[in-house]
């Protein structure tokens, strides 16, 4: 569903992404671990078409993002670290508005169900977003992404700043998306969360994918030790 082929992105003399080869199939959850500047967000930006690769290709469902970005984005939903919503609209109104940008309309019943499925409390659905916590805003973002019924989800640090309860609810949603056959690519700093939800885990540093592991084949402590070893090793 998602494929990077020798994907490279440079900014002047700085190479943010070095010849990345990566694929995420339907039903897979692939987590990219790494510090700031590792290339995680650049990878997601290339799949979204926000950044044009300097060389190589990003494909979504076989569609090249660089030459056919609008077509590729039809298969994508995106949840950033901070979901930006209209503060004077309710959660329901935000969901209905953003979905209308796709050219489709949601019934009130469908919009309500999507918000409830995303974990938003029923009492909050009609309240203005300006009073929401970050976790509540993320849940509206999840509902917006889910409403699109996209085959692949791109997530950039989606659990940053969430309390443990909200993070656990988010992990359960990701596992549901996987069971539904969606491909999930998530950039994160959270080793524990990656081990909990991922099918495969990649470790990135300085724009390079250093390794990718099957999550079921490694325990949390081994993953943490491997991560620390890679962070202490020079990549050039």
Image: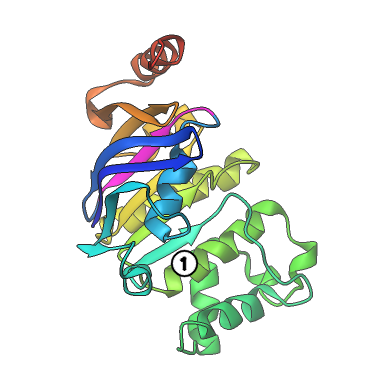
Q: Position of residue 19 (x, y in %)?
A: 29, 36
Residue 90 sits in which quadrant?
bottom right
Residue 201 seen: yes
**What is the magenta range?**
28-35
Residue 178 placement (x, y as % from top left): 30, 54
Which of these two is toward me, 175 or 235? Answer: 235
The image quarter containing residue 159 is: top right
Quarter the C terminus occupies? top left
Specify whether residue 229 is painted magenta: no
Look at the image and tell me whether residue 173 can be seen: no
State the residue at coordinates (37%, 55%).
Answer: 47
Q: Residue at x 68, y 68 (%)?
A: 85
Which residue sits at x=55%, y=87%?
108
Q: Position of residue 24 (x, y in %)?
A: 25, 48
Disc 1 is placed on an element classified as helix
Vertical comparison of 171 with 71: above or below: above
> Residue, x 32% and y 33% (percent of image)?
201
151 displayed left or right of 117: left
Q: Nearer the viewer, residue 105 or 48?
A: 48
| Quarter of the image that includes the N terminus | bottom left
**Most foreground residue, 201 or 168:** 201
**Residue extending farthest front:** 12
Q: How was this image coloured? A: rainbow
Place of residue 97 in the rendered image (x, y in percent of width and height, measured from the top left): 60, 82
Q: Is residue 71 above or below residue 82?
A: below
From the viewer's perspective, is residue 110 above or below residue 25?
Answer: below
Instruction: Label the magenta part by its dominant secondary structure.
Output: strand
Quarter of the rendering containing residue 31: top left
Q: Residues within 10 Å of mark 1 (few under 14, many from 20)?
A: many
Please state if 233 lies on the left or on the right of 112 as rendered: left
Q: Badge 1 is on which residue? A: 145
Q: Is residue 34 magenta?
A: yes
């Amino acid at each position: 569903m998602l494929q990077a082929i020798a994907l490279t992105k440079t900014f002047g003399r700085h190479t943010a992404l070095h010849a990345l080869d990566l694929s995420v199939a339907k039903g897979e959850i692939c987590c990219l671990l790494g510090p700031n500047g590792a290339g995680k967000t650049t990878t997601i930006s290339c799949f979204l078409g926000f950044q044009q690769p300097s060389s190589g290709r990003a494909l979504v469902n076989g569609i090249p993002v660089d030459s056919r970005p609008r077509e590729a984005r039809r298969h994508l939903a995106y949840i950033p670290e901070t979901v930006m919503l209209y503060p004077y609209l309710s959660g329901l109104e935000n969901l209905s508005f953003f979905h209308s940008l796709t050219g489709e309309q949601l019934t009130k019943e469908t919009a309500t169900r999507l918000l409830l499925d995303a974990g938003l409390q029923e009492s909050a659905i009609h309240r203005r977003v300006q009073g929401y916590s970050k976790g509540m805003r993320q849940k509206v973002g999840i509902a917006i992404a889910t409403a699109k019924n996209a085959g692949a989800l791109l997530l950039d640090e989606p659990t940053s700043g969430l309390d443990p309860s909200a993070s656990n609810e988010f992990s359960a949603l990701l596992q549901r998306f996987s069971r539904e056959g969606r491909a999930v690519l998530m950039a994160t700093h959270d080793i524990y969360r990656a081990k909990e939800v991922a099918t495969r885990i990649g470790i990135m540093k300085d724009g390079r994918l250093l390794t990718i592991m099957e999550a079921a084949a490694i325990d949390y402590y081994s993953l943490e030790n491997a991560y620390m070893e890679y962070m202490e090793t020079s990549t050039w």
